[in-house]
Image: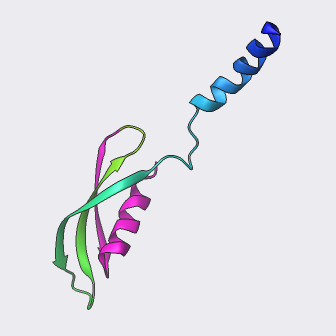
Amino acid sequence: MKKLLFGVAAIAVPFMLATSPAMAGCSACAVQTKVPAPEAGKFIYKVTCIDDQSGDEVTSTVTAANDDEAFKLGKEKCVP
């Protein structure tokens, strides 16, 4: 029985510790600046996100029509 449990643990633990690329990214972002862009109806945003794996702050400059689009673009730039 102990050998069985040890075998299961030896196989399961590395999978639990490994993080998949799907888990990587940023879940928390905030707008730092928002200024009108030369394009009508768009803004230039400076968006800061926190990398979920490292805790590092990732700052991106994106052009978007609204805050939600800016957050989406900022999160995309956060993925390694």
Seen from the viewer's position, the closer of residues 31 and 5 is 5
Colour scheme in use:
rainbow
Residue 53: quarter of image: top left
Picture coordinates of residue 63 (x, y %)?
Answer: 30, 75
Residue appearing at x 73%, y 23% in the figure: 11
Q: Residue furthest bottom?
A: 40
Picture coordinates of residue 21 (x, y %)?
Answer: 56, 46
Q: Give the range drawn in magenta.
A: 55-80
Residue appearing at x 35%, y 66% in the figure: 71
Q: Is residue 9 magenta?
A: no
User: Does 59 sit left or right of 18 as displayed?
Assistant: left
Q: Which residue lies furthest to the top in this view?
A: 2
User: Does 14 sit left or right of 61 as displayed?
Assistant: right
Seen from the viewer's position, the closer of residues 43 and 9 is 9
Seen from the viewer's position, the closer of residues 38 and 34 is 34
User: Does 42 sit left or right of 53 as displayed?
Assistant: left
Q: Is residue 76 magenta?
A: yes
User: Does 79 sit left or right of 28 as displayed?
Assistant: right
- The answer to whether 54 is drawn above or below residue 46 in the figure is above
Residue 17: quarter of image: top right
Name the quarter where the N terminus is drawn.
top right
Q: Residue furthest front?
A: 1
Picture coordinates of residue 70 (x, y %)?
Answer: 33, 70
Residue appearing at x 26%, y 60% in the figure: 30
